[in-house]
Every structure is written in structure tokens, then in C-alpha cells.
Amino acid sequence: MANRYYLDETRYPRTGNCVFISYHYSDRDAAKQIANYISQSGVDIYFDEYNTHIGSGDPKKSVDYIKAGIRRSSHMLCVLSQTALKSQLMPWEIGYGYDLLQVVGLTVKELAKSDLPEYLQVVPVLRGTKTLNTFIANTVGRVADSLIREQKMFSASQMNHPLDNILDWQL
């Protein structure tokens, strides 16, 4: 498993499944926990915080790295919160990736499904740890229970789940 944050697509071609994590900057800590949870299950991720070239003061270069991350991914997981819905970059990322990969939303605890804007009502929306586990299992082509038995992810109903403070466990 790897964190794909490099731009050189000729040296590192797209292989297998990789989840691009889209989020609003204010949700960075929650997005990082979600990214790490997905990565621990054996799925490659692209998480921009691991790319030291983004935010270097050159907006064009930052956009080029984000575009490369989207192109090299098979899925985009959008961490949806009240602040993310006000993001200017997330709709751009979704629009850029919509025809290139599978776009999926993941709502955090405080966000009701009715709060979603139209551009997010056309993609599957995960509502909590149970559906996130199903998404991960489908991404790697495995059964969720086997990943839980192998301790690559946690049961949604497990006490002290690592994402309890971020996601609803029943959904």
C-alpha cells in the first residue's frame, strides 16, 4: 500500500485502486484520520497533505499535482461537512474527476443528507462507518467481514472505533 502523492506519471503509472481524498482544509484532521483508516485496510490513497509540493506558493503547480492525483486514482472520496459544502476547490475536483473515476461522498456526523447540494446528489453518499467499510471492501474486491477478521479495518459497531468522533457508526 502506498500514498500516491507524486506527479511523475511516466515513472509511477497508475496501478490498481487508489482513493483520492477530497476535503475542505478546515476538515484536514478528520480527512487525515479517514485517509489513514482506508490506507490501513490495504487501499492506496492520494492525500494532498502528504505532497510537499502543494501549497508551495505556485498555484499552477499545486493544481497540476491535484489533477495528477485525480488522474492516477480510481476513486474519489469527498469528506462532506458544513464547511466542505462552502469549498471552492471541492466542486472543481469533483467536476474534474467525474468522468475519470468513481466519485463518492462521505458525510461527517453533523451533516444531514438533505443539506447536500445538487452536484453531490448524483453521486453515491456514504453516511457512516458501516457504509465506509462496505466501500473499502468493494474497492479491494473483498468481503468486509474478512477484512475485519484480518484486523485491516474495524467493525462499525465496535466500541472505540477510530472514526467514532467523525462518522455515525450505524450508517
Image: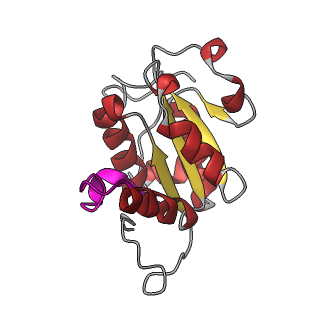
In this rendering, is residue 27 above or below 43?
Answer: above
Picture quadrant where residue 74 is located: bottom right
Residue 50 colored in magenta in the image: yes
Taking the image as drawn, is residue 161 in sight?
A: no
Find the residue positioned furthest to the right: 122
Foreground pick, 7 / 102: 7
Seen in the picture, residue 168 relative to 44 is either above or below; the reply is above
Q: Please state, as top left, top right, bottom left or bottom right, where the N terminus lies in the image.
A: bottom left
On the picture, is 99 further left or further right than 152?
A: right
**Where residue 143 sits in the image (x, y, percent)?**
61, 52
Percent of width and height locating residue 34: 39, 41
Q: Is residue 123 visible?
A: yes
Picture layout, residue 110 above or below residue 20: above
Q: Quadrant of residue 130?
A: top right
> How far across and down, in percent of the image, does residue 151 sit?
38, 51
Colour approach in the figure: secondary structure
Residue that appears at 63% across and 53% down: 97
Residue positioned most to the bottom: 11
Q: Which residues are magenta?
A: 44-59
- In the rendered image, which quarter contains the C terminus? top right
Q: Which residue is more in the foreground, 85 or 137? A: 85
The number of callouts visible is 0
Name which quarter of the figure residue 17 lies in: bottom right
Q: Residue at x 57, y 43 (%)?
A: 92
The residue that appears at 71% across and 37% down in the rendered structure is 123
Is residue 151 found inside the magenta-colored segment of the image? no
Q: Is residue 75 above or below residue 37?
A: below
Between 100 and 155, the one nearer to me in the picture: 100
Residue 82: percent from left, percent from top: 47, 18
